[in-house]
Image (cartoon, rainbow, N blue to C red):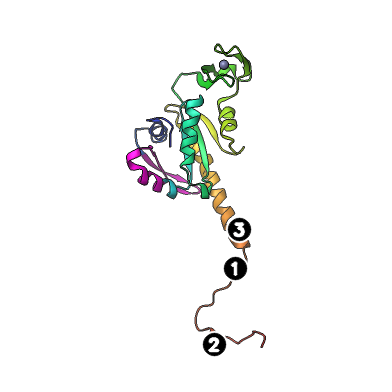
Amino acid sequence: MATEDGLATAFLAALAGQPTDRIEMQHPAGQLLIEAVVPDAEQEEAIQSRLNDAAGVILVTGHIDEAGLESLRRLRQRLPANRKLPQAHALHREQGRAEFKLSCPSCGQKLWVGDAQEGRPGRCPGCRQTFLIPSQARHLAASLQLDDDVPIRVQFRGDTATAVALVHELAARLAARISEMESRQKNMTMRIVIDGDAAKWPDTRPH
Ligand SMILES: [Zn+2]
């Protein structure tokens, strides 16, 4: 799912090597089917049912200014809350662009920030306040209060290696969740089921 038109399909295109809105991939965890879900008011129900069926979600964001983060928050609200769906984040960047869009923490002014400025103090031309320029991933994780282990990667348009790496990180989380569920089930004390006619068995209940 993506915050802007065309970003989800751009991510899939990087995986497939050609424009597509769905792709199947082999992974040690099993067969993965990845589909682009484009929020559309007219297909609200269909979209929601696909999200309810999903095992995990990749959220693609263009800019991490306030507007971008707000659309990302709205997307995340649509995820089924009861299942804590494993998620991964792709920060989409146009080829050759070494900067990203951020909002000033004091006044909200939209600012272009260079990768090379990460970790350095910058001054907002709007309100003259200085602030430490965060990395894109760290800023996203802090703004959305993501768990530390949620994969976040900057992905340039057409960058297959990063897209594949992100899918593998998400798939590893899915696999871990499945084996966790299996072991939780084994640790549960379950009532045994006996097939056939119970009366044939010696009655060992106390009389
Ligand atoms: Zn400012």
User: Disc 3 marks which residue?
Assistant: 184
Q: Are the residues at dot 1 and dot 3 in contact (C-beta closer than 8 Å)? A: no
Q: Is residue 42 visible?
A: yes
Instruction: Count neighbours of disc 1 (C-alpha within 10 A) and say few if under 14, some if 14 to 19, many if 20 or more.
Output: few
Q: Quadrant of the C terminus?
A: bottom right
- Label 3 residue near ligand 1, CB within 8 Å: no
Residue 77 percent coordinates (x, y): 48, 40
Q: Residue at x 44, y 22 (%)?
A: 94
Residue 6 percent coordinates (x, y): 37, 30
Q: Is residue 186 left or right of residue 15?
A: right
Residue 74 percent coordinates (x, y): 47, 36
Q: Are the residues at dot 3 and dot 2 in contact (C-beta closer than 8 Å)? A: no
Residue 117: give its label: none
Q: Nearer the viewer, mark 1 or mark 2?
A: 1
Q: CA distance from mark 3 to mark 2?
A: 33 Å
Which amino acid does the dot numbered 3 rest on?
A: Arg
User: Disc 2 marks which residue?
Assistant: 200
Q: Residue at x 54, y 74 (%)?
A: 193
Residue 130 percent coordinates (x, y): 63, 15
User: Disc 1 marks which residue?
Assistant: 190
Read off the magenta span: 22-50
